């Protein structure tokens, strides 16, 4: 069994026909990892025996029966490490399953392997991992994107059929675009975050990486829904995502936000995305230019709100209840200061300090409260646009994968990598990145991603729009 | 808003983050730079605009007030760097 090009849909067909057993599939994943991961470095850890034991017992009649799914190292799987790629969580073993893991298991899937990420999901290149470098499967000199770089790379490199990541400002869609796979960020409240280590609680969402839109619909179906353990998950029915998948886009109105085609973006990226828009026109969609006037403030807005929330969420890492603790502290203040000073990496420190500052007395109104008001304006931009159109089309990232080390010295340049993905998190809407061709850079073919956005809780429509493009391109 | 000054050393102490001198020297200009970028929000007119705390329209979510299973003491302390007698151990807090 070769994993190359193997989708969940295809694997399920083989399993149900008795031509492939779940244990053989785990064996195939192991072979692929042993062959490819030394060069890519997408996984932090994996336990083949545990996966095989689960594979032997799995009910293959379930929707994801026998499908191994790689998990970003920020989502708890009982009995497995969950380091968030941080030194401060070395040795930590998750005592319970996140709700998405419980749901994956209930659908017959096998949570398998921990994938690399930027420390605490803070970053856009996975270079902030304190544990290892992950390389872009297309070019080992380049980053896989981030923060869910490992989850994107293992799918794109055919070392996994699917994976889960988290998206706070683009951390699923941007690495999917840069590695060349499908990455879906569901609407805020669609998927439970219980068991996800919190970064920015008003923005975080869990979603899948897959080879195809069809597969993304299958994984979303398994993990979506209300959870009493996450009070921000909404109690709304989960529609059938696969049923309307092939309904096409004829008669739909798709908006192209003019602010998403900016100076400084890679002309090859623009060309691929414009070509994808023409594909939609050819499929019978009406293409309309729209405006999201507050787009240019999204990055600044995000770095106030996300860092403020992060500074509060990361207060729990104090070396008392879990994780690493500084050796021989003089007193409690020394214990906290050195535990956190030694345990957190640079980007995490930058964000904790910035977040604390914008929340501090005297600056709260000027920064945090103002940012929340600007967030309202960004939300309204989308509400206004979605009154006119059914979905939005844009690039996922202004550039293809950049070189390892290229942006590390300038945090602001790194933050701007998420310029097209951040607004969806601020507005709480859903978005997906699908591959739309390559940009040729230094003789390497680097993937380009098309981002599609739809109103909150309209994942069925989002997937249908994405699927129409996927089908047209593979025809 | 007049250009405020983010004092890395002062804030780091507030959040119990021990930094080395090299880190302070590196972080200070980086954060000043990010802060000057963030200040562009000053040009947005937010007069009369309600703040958005989060994107979903749910507030005051209640659950039934019934007991449910939690961790055992053993599970709760299993990840602690130092524990004993079912307790988390920390450096002495009170002098005397």
Image (spheres, coloured by chain):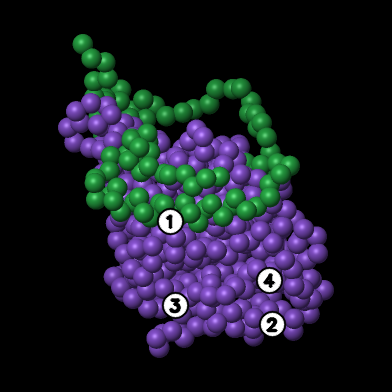
Q: CA distance from mark 1 to mark 3?
A: 45 Å
User: Eyeballing the image, is A356 above or below A435?
Assistant: above
**Disc 2 with disc 3 on a shared chain:** yes
Please name the residue that numbered disc 2 is placed on. A279
Asked if residue A415 is positioned above or below residue A442 in the image, the reply reads above
Q: Which residue does the numbered mark 1 point to in the structure image?
A: B33
Alpha-carbon distance for marks 3 and 4?
Answer: 38 Å
Which comes sooner in the sequence, label 2 or label 4? Answer: 4
Asked whether residue A182 appears in the rendered view, the answer is no
Q: Mark 4 falls on what kind of element?
A: helix
| Left or right, A131 with reference to A315 | left
Front-most of residues A137 and B37: B37
Q: Colour of chain B?
A: green
- Residue sitting at x 55%, y 82%: A267
Q: Secondary structure at mark 3?
A: loop
Q: Where does the N terminus of chain A fall, quadrant-wise? A: bottom left
**C-beta proximity under 8 Å, tags 2 and 4:** no
Residue matched to label 4: A258
State yes or no: discs 3 and 4 in contact (Cβ < 8 Å).
Answer: no
Residue under mark 2: which chain is it in? A
**Upstream in sequence: badge 3 or badge 4:** 3
Q: CA distance from mark 2 to mark 3?
A: 27 Å
Label 4: chain?
Answer: A
In front: mark 2 or mark 3?
Answer: 2
Q: Which residue bears the numbered disc 3? A: A4
Picture coordinates of residue A128, whole percent (x, y):
35, 58
């Amino acid at each position: 069994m070769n994993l190359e090009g193997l989708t969940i849909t295809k694997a399920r067909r083989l399993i149900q026909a008795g031509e492939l057993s779940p244990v053989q599939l785990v064996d195939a994943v192991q072979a692929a990892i042993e062959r490819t991961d030394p060069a890519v470095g997408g996984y932090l850890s994996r336990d083949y025996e545990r996966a095989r034991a689960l594979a032997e017992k799995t009910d293959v009649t379930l929707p994801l029966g026998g499908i191994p799914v790689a998990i970003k190292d920020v989502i708890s799987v009982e009995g497995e490490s969950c380091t968030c790629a941080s030194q401060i969580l070395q040795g930590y073993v998750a005592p319970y399953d996140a709700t998405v893991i419980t749901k994956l298991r209930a659908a017959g899937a096998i949570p398998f392997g921990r994938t690399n990420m930027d420390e605490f999901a803070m970053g856009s290149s996975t270079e902030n991992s304190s544990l290892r470098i992950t390389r872009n499967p297309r070019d080992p000199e380049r980053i896989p994107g981030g923060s869910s770089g490992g989850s994107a790379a293992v799918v794109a490199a055919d070392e996994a059929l699917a994976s889960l990541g988290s998206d706070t400002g683009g951390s699923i869609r941007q690495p999917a675009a840069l590695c060349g796979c499908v990455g879906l960020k569901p609407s805020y409240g669609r998927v439970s975050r219980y068991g996800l280590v919190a970064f920015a609680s008003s923005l975080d969402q869990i979603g899948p990486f897959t080879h195809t839109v069809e597969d993304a619909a299958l994984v979303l179906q398994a993990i979506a829904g209300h959870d009493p353990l996450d009070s921000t998950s909404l109690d709304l029915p989960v529609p059938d995502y696969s049923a309307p998948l092939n309904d096409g886009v004829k008669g739909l109105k798709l908006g192209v936000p003019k602010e998403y085609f900016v100076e400084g973006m890679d002309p090859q990226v623009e060309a691929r995305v414009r070509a994808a828009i023409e594909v939609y026109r050819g499929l019978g969609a009406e293409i309309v230019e729209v405006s999201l006037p507050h787009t240019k403030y999204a990055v600044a807005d995000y770095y106030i709100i996300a860092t403020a929330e992060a500074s509060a969420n990361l207060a729990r890492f104090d070396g008392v209840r879990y994780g690493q603790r500084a050796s021989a502290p003089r007193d409690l203040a020394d214990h906290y200061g050195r535990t956190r000073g030694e345990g957190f990496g640079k980007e995490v420190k930058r964000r904790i300090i910035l977040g604390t500052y914008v929340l501090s007395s005297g600056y709260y109104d000027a920064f945090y409260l103002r940012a929340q008001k600007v967030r309202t304006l960004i939300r309204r931009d989308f509400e206004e646009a979605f009154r006119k159109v059914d979905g939005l089309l844009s690039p996922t990232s202004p550039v293809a994968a950049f070189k390892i080390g290229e942006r590390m010295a300038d945090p602001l340049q790194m933050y701007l990598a998420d310029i097209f993905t951040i607004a969806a998190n601020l507005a709480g809407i859903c978005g997906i990145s699908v591959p739309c061709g390559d940009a040729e850079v230094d003789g390497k073919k680097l993937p380009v991603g098309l981002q599609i956005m739809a109103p909150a809780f309209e994942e069925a429509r989002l997937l249908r729009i994405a699927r129409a493009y996927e089908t047209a391109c593979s025809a | 808003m007049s250009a405020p000054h983010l004092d890395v050393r002062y804030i780091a102490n507030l959040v119990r983050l021990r930094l080395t001198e090299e880190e302070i020297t590196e972080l200070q200009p980086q954060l000043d730079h990010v802060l000057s970028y963030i200040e562009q929000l000053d040009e947005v007119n937010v007069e009369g605009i309600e703040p958005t705390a989060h994107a979903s329209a749910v507030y005051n979510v209640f659950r039934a007030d019934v007991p449910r299973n939690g961790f055992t003491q053993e599970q709760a302390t299993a990840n602690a760097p130092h524990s004993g007698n079912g307790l988390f151990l920390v450096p002495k807090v009170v002098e005397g």
